[in-house]
Amino acid sequence: MTTKLHAFFALALFAFAAPLAAQNASAPSVESRLREQIKSVTGQLRTAETEKATLQTEKAALEEKVKVSAAAVVKLDKDLTTETERAKKEGETLRTKITEKEAELAQKQAELAKATDFGTKVADLARKTEAARSKLDAENILLKRIVADQRTKNGKMFEIGNEILTRYQKFGFGTAITSREPFVGITRAKLETLVEEYGGKIAEQRIKAVGETPVAKSSQEASKKPKAAPSDTRRPKD
């Protein structure tokens, strides 16, 4: 393209210079001016070709940059699409995990509430058990005391019973006959008095039930009092 442009300018200069050559004899100053113009045009032409080459180089560089930028834009768009999809998937995964954690937290809270209620019930049961144990300990101590008292009173009752039998054996029918006293008389009265006396002693030594009222005590003592032996109207023989 540069060769054709040079040929075009050369033809133009030749066509322009031919008429001027005919007038060369009469106007030598015109030729010199023409040469100066041709020289100036040639310089401008070279400058234009240089600028054109520079511009073409710059154009090629710009086109390359555009291609690189376009490729970068395509890559960025692709990367953006990929990152967007990945972000969506991660968001869905996180939402799923959050839902699961919320359900797990709700379950843990329910279990904690149950454990708290169970702990409260256990503590209340422990207090009741401790109160019952304390009560049983107190009752056990009381029972031990009652048993000890029972043993003591039973021993005394045994001694009293032996004493009654001994005195009754000493004061029997033989004594009554020897003293010539009718059995229905003085001897019977003494035996009844003796039985009543020791019956009262035995009643005093018996074990009293826990919480026994005086009325029940008196009725029980009355029921426990020994009965007098039936009277014998027969007189002993002399």
Image: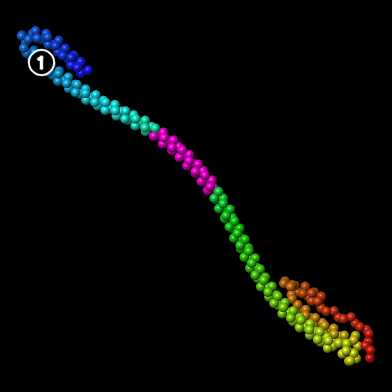
Packing grade of label 1 (10 A; few <14, some 14-19, many >=20) is: few
**Image-based side of 215 in relation to 2, left or right:** right
Q: From this view, report whether residue 86 is shown above or below residue 150.
A: above
Amino acid under label 1?
Arg
Majority SS type along the magenta span? helix
Residue at 90%, 90% in the rendered image: 177
Number of numbered tags placed on the structure image: 1
**Image-based side of 203 in relation to 122, left or right:** right
Quadrant of the frame with the N terminus: top left
Residue at 54%, 45% in the rendered image: 103
Q: From this view, report whether residue 222 is shown above or below residue 110.
A: below
> Depth check: 7 or 153 in front?
7
**Image-based side of 91 in relation to 123, left or right:** left
Residue at 24%, 26% in the rendered image: 57
Magenta region, residue range: 79-106
Q: In which quarter of the image is residue 211?
A: bottom right
Q: What element carries label 1?
A: helix
Residue at 15%, 18% in the rendered image: 41
Asked whether the viewer can see residue 177, the reply is yes
Q: From this view, report whether residue 37 is shown above or below residue 158.
A: above
Q: From this view, report whether residue 96 is shown above or below residue 23.
A: below
The residue carrying mark 1 is 35
Asked whether the viewer can see residue 186, the reply is no
Quadrant of the frame with the C terminus: bottom right
Look at the image and say whether residue 119 sits in the magenta stretch.
no
Report x, y in % for residue 82.
41, 35
> Depth check: 138 or 8 in front?
8
